[in-house]
């Protein structure tokens, strides 16, 4: 297994292998910014958004496996304007938010390339696409009013003619205007998990023959709304994980839930970092790797957002390379779960993390003086492989 790295360096496509092929550099005016702002992966595809450029539009880059299983650039998707702040992928469908609309791309069977098949808008004056989730033909889109007051989650699905249509709009079951309902979404196997950190709550919906209905409310318990429980979350199979990155004076926590047959959803673990550990906002990134393992980000803040901090924080001696952790959580485990670390990786609060099977992708949008980069790691059965040699994919 290898650890790879992708870095955006120009608008003209080229590839070089680290220590192998001579690189070619473009004119600096062609360079774009914040490559790695959002990341998604699945079905052998890797998607990396790039928010803006000096002379280029925002775009989403598509990577696939090439010869020797190396990642190679396939295409760059752009429609003009600033888009790519949020992206999501599932079952052959890529969704990209622009702020006022969400663009949908699907693979053209004739060219084997992604092409735009839809542009979805809200009937309200909202920030549309603040969160995205896709699964089994459904697309969930989070939205909010410009002042952040009212939030909705829109559910789209194709009709028989192949057109994406809105099938439902979900609203906060409570009455709080500051609930932040829908700021985080996860969808899997006919279930939709919606974060509502302003109310310290997450809602679990299930799809039945008559539509989407609320099936469980996953409360934060003794935590307060200041904990931002529900700001991050993930859902896979019978397990849900919910981040509370501001719990305990912003040290952070992650709550693990398990669906137990007729008993419903049960809180089985609350993960917290050591009191003397370097970092804050534990749970800023949460991803379920499999039925046992959970990936948790414990960001190190300092310097430029999205730039990895190495060698310790100013005035501190903490080990900053323990801030991307893999916890093994069993549903019948009484003791505190142990964790391993992803070697050589230091995430910040602006680093998106995506996990799909044996692939992990991490964005560093502020790296390389704002150009941005993304790290790729692969799971070898015992851990995530890091270190060198690395393959750099540039465009």
Image (tube, rainbow, N blue to C red):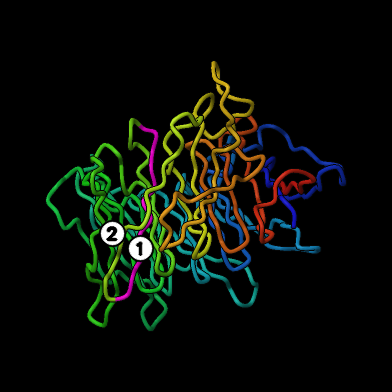
Residues tagged 1 and 2 counted as in contact (Cβ below 8 A): yes
Viewer-nearest residue: 190 or 380: 380
Q: Is residue 138 left or right of residue 321?
A: left
Q: Specify which label sits upstream in the sequence, 1 or 2.
A: 1
Pick the front one: 226 or 265: 265
Q: Is 22 situated left or right of 357 in this image? A: right
Q: Badge 2: few (under 14), some or many (20 or more) residues near its Cα, within 10 Å? A: many
Residue shown at 39%/65% (left/top)? Answer: 187
Q: Residue furthest front?
A: 334
**Residue 222 found in image quarter:** top left
- Give the labeled residue for mark 2: 153
Tag 1 residue: 140
Q: What residue is drawn where x is 65% and y is 37%?
A: 31
Task: Examine the image and state in which quarter residue 102 appears.
Answer: bottom left
* Magenta residue span: 250-261
Which quarter of the rendering shows the N terminus? bottom right
Q: Work out whether residue 332 or residue 107 is closer to the camera in this orientation and state it.
A: 332
Name the foreground residue: 42 vs 234. 234
Q: Residue 65 magenta-drawn?
A: no
Above/below status of 46 relative to 244: below
Q: CA distance from mark 1 to mark 2?
A: 6 Å
Residue 238 on image: x %, y %: 39, 69
Labels in figure, total: 2
> Where is residue 306 shown, x and y percent of the image?
54, 35
At numbered mark 2, what does the secondary structure look like: helix, strand or loop? strand
Mark 1 nearby-residue class (10 Å; few <14, some 14–19, many ≥20): many
Q: Position of residue 357 (x, y in %)?
A: 58, 64
Q: Position of residue 135 (x, y in %)?
A: 43, 69
Residue at 74%, 46% (x, y): give it.
392
Examine the rendered structure and indicate whether residue 72 appears above or below residue 24: below
């Amino acid at each position: 297994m290898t650890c790879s790295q992708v870095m955006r360096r120009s608008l003209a496509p080229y590839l070089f292998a680290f220590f192998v092929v001579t690189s070619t550099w473009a004119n600096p005016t062609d360079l774009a910014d914040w490559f790695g702002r959002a990341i998604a992966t699945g079905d052998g595809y890797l998607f990396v958004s790039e928010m803006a450029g000096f002379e280029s539009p925002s775009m989403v880059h598509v990577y696939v496996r090439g010869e020797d299983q190396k990642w190679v650039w396939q295409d760059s998707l752009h429609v003009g304007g600033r888009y790519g702040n949020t992206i999501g992928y599932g079952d052959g469908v890529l969704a990209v938010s622009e702020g006022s609309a969400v663009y949908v791309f699907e693979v053209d069977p004739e060219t084997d390339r992604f092409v735009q098949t839809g542009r979805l808008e809200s009937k309200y004056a909202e920030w549309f696409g603040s969160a995205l989730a896709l699964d089994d033909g459904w697309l969930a889109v989070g939205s909010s009013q410009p002042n952040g007051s009212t939030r909705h989650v829109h559910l789209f699905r194709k009709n028989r003619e192949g057109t994406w249509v809105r099938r439902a709009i979900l609203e906060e079951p409570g009455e709080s205007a500051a609930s932040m309902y829908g700021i985080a979404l996860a969808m899997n196997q006919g279930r939709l998990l919606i974060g509502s950190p302003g109310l310290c709550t997450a809602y679990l919906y299930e799809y039945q023959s008559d539509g989407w209905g609320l099936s469980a409310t996953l409360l934060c318990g003794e935590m307060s709304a200041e904990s931002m429980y529900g700001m991050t979350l993930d859902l896979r199979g019978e397990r849900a994980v919910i981040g509370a990155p501001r719990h305990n004076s912003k040290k952070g926590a992650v709550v693990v839930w398990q669906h137990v047959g007729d008993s419903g959803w049960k809180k089985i673990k609350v993960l917290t970092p050591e009191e003397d550990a370097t970092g804050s906002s534990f749970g800023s990134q949460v991803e379920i790797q499999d039925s046992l393992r959970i990936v948790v980000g414990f960001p190190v803040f300092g310097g430029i957002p999205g730039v990895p901090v190495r060698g310790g924080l100013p005035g501190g001696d903490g080990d900053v390379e323990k801030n991307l952790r893999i916890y093994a959580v069993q549903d019948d485990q009484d003791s505190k779960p142990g964790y391993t670390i992803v070697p050589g990786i230091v995430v910040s609060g602006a680093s998106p993390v995506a996990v799909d099977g044996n692939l992990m992708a991490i964005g560093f949008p502020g790296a390389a003086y704002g150009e941005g980069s993304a790290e790729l790691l692969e799971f070898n059965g015992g851990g995530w492989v890091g270190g060198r040699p690395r393959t750099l994919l540039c465009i």
